[in-house]
Amino acid sequence: MAMTPKIELSAVTKSFDANHVLKGIDLTIAPKESLVIIGTSGCGKSVLMKCLNGLITPDSGSIKIDGKEILGQGRAALEDLRQRFGMTFQFGALFDSLPIWENVTFRLHHQRGLGKSEARDIAAQTISQLGLAAAVIDRYPAELSGGMQKRVALARAIVDEPEILLFDEPTSGLDPITGGVIDRLIVDARKRLGATTVTISHDMASVRRIADKVAMVHDGVIIWAGPARNMEKSGVPEVHQFVHGLSDGPLTREKILSNKAHL
């Protein structure tokens, strides 16, 4: 008997006025799998991610979690769905006015009405798992380095042990060593929680470290998806150019033609 995908997208479309961003996304993600979505800037990766967690409603198509359709659900069902997700945003999106312990336990507090002492204990335990000193919980985001802020954002995403983790450019803006540390923490957290993860990344070193499966979005569709070990030999010119960071290829030629068309 075939295993039910953790996440399944079929013919998902999304347009903003005349801008057709997603033109029919088909993708399946197995339970506990780490999928990384790659693609050039503006190709629709972030829109796809927001469709997954309900921040954006697709125009058409199907999104199923554990075989259950999530599109067209009411507000209560959508809130229940979001509680199954943890997410980090590209620039951290920490609350500058709140100390770290309140940032980490923000959602837990609203879900369970945690007292201050319990929230502080949970925050300290969670950030300690990510290699930060417990004393950091009383500091504010502006007092932390970029790498420390990324760890705090990761702590906030995993603190309530979600089934699905979404990461939007988790190593963006970090030096290679710190980026490697964040990747290791992501892998460790996924294994500890038994979570399914979906990551957006343009950092190919990071992709190679964390991905079980890779999917490339181009012109609103998935042009290739497969095991990470196979992306070097995909046979798709756009994937080859992106994976190897080549300056010449179909992706750059298309951009040049597009720019000329707008002159």
Image (cartoon, rainbow, N blue to C red):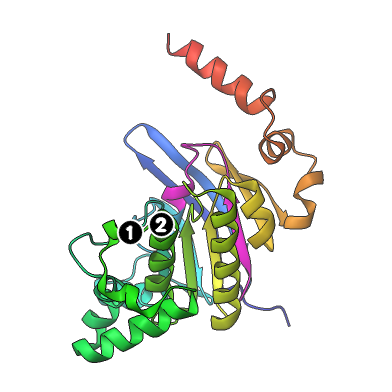
* Residue occupied by mark 2: 51
- Report if residue 235 lies within the magenta region: no
Residue lying at 41% horizontally and 46% vertically, measured from the top left:
14
Looking at the image, is 251 positioned above or below residue 49?
above
Q: Quadrant of residue 155?
A: bottom left
Query: Residue 2's spot in the image, x, y percent?
Result: 71, 78
- Report if residue 41 lies within the magenta region: yes
Q: Which mark is residue 235?
A: none
Which quadrant does the N terminus fall into? bottom right
Query: Residue 143's spot in the image, x, y percent?
Result: 29, 59
* Residue occupied by mark 1: 55
Q: Which portion, as a residue range, is magenta?
A: 32-48
Whether pointer 1 and pointer 2 mark residues with C-beta atoms closer than 8 Å, the reply is yes
Helix, strand or loop for disc 1: loop
Spatial separation of the CA atoms under disc 1 and disc 2: 6 Å
Query: Residue 148's spot in the image, x, y percent?
Result: 41, 62
Query: Residue 41's spot in the image, x, y percent?
Result: 49, 37
Is residue 30 shown left or right of residue 10?
right
Q: Quadrant of residue 247?
A: top right
Q: Amino acid at mark 1?
A: Leu
Query: Of all residues shown, which one is farthest toward the top?
Result: 263
